[in-house]
Image (spheres, rainbow, N blue to C red):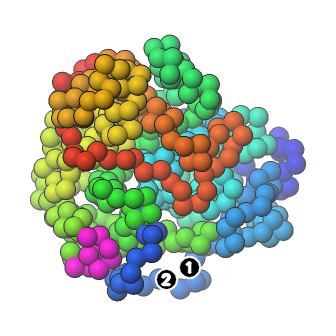
Amino acid sequence: MKPRHVVSLPFATPTSSTSSSSLSRAMVTTYRRRRRVKPPTPPPSSTPPPPPLPPSLHKQNPNPSYPNSATRRSLASSLQWELLPFPQSELSLPLTLPTGQSFRWRLTGPVQFTGVVGSHLISLTHLDTSPSRQVAFHLHTDSSISSAQSALSDYFNFGISLSDLWQEFSAADLRFKELSERFGGGARVMRQDPIECVFQFLCSSNNNIKRIEKMVSVLESYGRHLGSVGGFDFHEFPSIERLASITETELREAGFGYRAKYVVGTAKALQGKPGGGEKWLSSLRQMELGIAIDALCTLPGVGPKVAACIALFSLDQHHAVPVDTHVWKIATRYLMPELAGMSLTPKLCNRVAEAFVAKYGKYAGWAQNVLFIGELSSQKVPSAVDGTAPHAGKAVKRKRVTKDLPISGGIEGK
């Protein structure tokens, strides 16, 4: 049945979900002008037009490069938005995409995010015409809808029931229960491609969000150009071999500073891993957390904190707890008040990680992600109830402690 107030907007019938085993899988603040090496932009004819939002989302758009309401209405019938069979309580885009897990998504319309998942250039939004504000996606690239749905299911860990987890967490912790009632669900942990996750978090070290996004955009530009949406260019993330061909000089001229040597060094180190870097990284999904952390720390520029982020956001290490200043404050306020006023040391960092696992179990990383979001200012955290989104470019950076602190290897199996 066609939703009310939607004019000629076709939706695909949601496909049945695949099995859990198959699914459980920042812009710089004004740099001084520097010469930057970047692959040539393809001719305009190869760039797909930005899609309109569904009519239910026709609101004033702060992005002047995005079509106005009249244009969106005139194009609506020629573009197809596909429904995902998940309500906002299982996936809230504003609570998931701009909250420090990935730096590749851009706000391209009111409560509309555009990014790349594998080789798919995709826009995502919530449908106000759906009682549960389901997520709909528009596929910009020339690939099959079913392939894009499968990629999104894997990327968003749809094999894991968020509502079940939040019920367990709320029963174990009053603070989590408060946040659950405030947000209404939907803050998921993503399952990113390990290669892009590694290089994104290499850029995050002692950095601000605008510079992280800028650096990640530079790295992306070495990949295949997929199109432009809302004034942003999008690329498929480059292969390890392509990244290894970039010189340190190129990256320094692009503003990477000391991180340039880590990007180049990590790319070459991954090339030398048994079976290749992609296979080696994927194999860490089957390792115990401590072993995976130690393995990642063999890469140039990757310390235990960055390794824990990579493990949680791409390697199925759901109980990894990246301890930063936010998480330390959470721990001393709600879990371990006896540590308040103390300085965070490697030993205390281990205790904090273990305390999270003791409280929340094998999905402790998912719980700390929600608690982390709860510490952010209201301007950066949208309301999952009214569907507002953060301002464009205001993605969230996870503050880093002064030193990269280790994560305890003693939390496996809990």
Q: Position of residue 335 (x, y in %)?
A: 37, 20
Residue type, mark 2 in image: Pro
Image quadrant holding the C terminus, namely: top left
Q: Which residue is mark 1?
A: 46
Residue type at the position of mark 1: Ser
One can see residue 93 in this view: no
Specify the farthest residue to the right.
5
Is residue 160 placed above or below 99 in the rendered structure?
above
Q: Residue at x 34, y 40 (%)?
A: 325
**For residue 303, side relative to residue 390 (left or right):** left
| Horizontal side, residue 160 vs residue 222: left or right | right
The residue at 30%/33% (across/down) is: 320
Of 317 and 250, nearer the camera is 250
Q: Is residue 255 magenta?
A: yes
Q: CA distance from mark 2 to mark 1?
A: 7 Å
Give the residues in magenta: 249-257
Q: Is residue 403 left or right of residue 163?
A: left
Which residue carries the number 2 mark? 42
Which quadrant would residue 9 be assigned to in this image?
Answer: bottom right
In terms of depth relative to the viewer, which is nearer, 89 or 3? 89
Mark 1 element type = helix
Residue at 81 percent across and 65 percent down: it is 69
Is residue 172 shown in magenta? no
Give the image location of residue 390, x and y in percent.
Answer: 60, 52
